[in-house]
Amino acid sequence: MLFGKEHVQRYRETDGAEGHEWQGTVTLLLTTKGRRSGKERTTPLIYQRDGDRYLIVASNGGTDEPPLWYRNIEADPSVKVQVQGDRFEARARTATPEEKPPLWEKMAATWPAYNEYQQKTDRDIQVVILERA
């Protein structure tokens, strides 16, 4: 997670005026339903637009386990997204092996550490596509 609960709250309250820009890149809020608890979980994530879609990366800092939000979308791909003041429902899906290379390049150009994260693990770090529902 990029920052704590109080930062998520400020992002929401200010429509991203606080929190959208982060360390030279941009973030959105992704809300998933916990696959075990059923509770909503919100995670700030670096993103990039790809046409009408939004791209995020399931890096988990290059650990061998995917982030919990990714496991949640595997169980239920219906998510809520907030990009600045734009709040919408979306469907999350993992980029196919054919789709992934240019999407990965786009995300790594935004956050070069993604390439380092991939080198740290044997896990194939996924690019996730968020499409408005």
Image (spheres, rainbow, N blue to C red):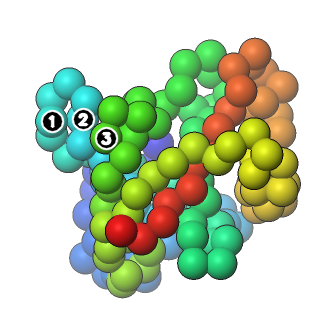
Q: Residue furthest left?
A: 38
Q: For residue 7, which quarter of the picture?
A: bottom left
Residue 7 seen in this snapshot:
no
> Which of the two labelled residues, at mark 3 and mark 2, occupies the earlier sequence position?
2
Crowdedness of circle 1 by 10 Å Cα count: few (<14), some, many (20+)? few
Give residue 61's position: percent from left, percent from top.
Answer: 63, 32
Look at the numbered disc 1 and give the secondary structure of its residue: loop
Q: Is residue 55 above or below residue 97?
A: below
Regarding mark 2 in the picture, which secondary structure is present there? loop
Choose the circle earlier in sequence order: 3 or 1: 1
Which amino acid does the dot numbered 1 rest on?
Gly
Q: What's the CA distance linking mark 3 and mark 2?
A: 9 Å
- Is 132 located above or below residue 55 in the figure? below
Residue at the location (36% across, 68% down)?
Answer: 133
What residue is pinned by disc 2?
34
The disc label shown at residue 76, or none: 3
Q: What amino acid does circle 2 point to?
A: Gly
Q: Residues within 10 Å of mark 3 (few under 14, many from 20)?
A: some
Do the CB atoms of the residues marked 1 and 2 lie less than 8 Å apart? Answer: yes
Q: Identity of the amino acid at label 3?
A: Asp
Name the element at disc 3.
Answer: loop
Q: Viewed as shown, does residue 47 lie left or right of 121?
A: left
Q: Is residue 21 left or right of residue 116?
A: left
User: Which residue is depicted at the point 42% across and 71% down?
Assistant: 132
**Quarter location, residue 105:** bottom right
- The image's mark for residue 9 is none
Tell me, yes or no, whether the two marked residues, 3 and 1, touch with CB atoms within 8 Å: no
Question: Relative to 71, is 76 on the left or the right?
Answer: left
Determine the residue positioned at 31% across, 41% down.
76
User: Which residue carries the number 1 mark?
Assistant: 38
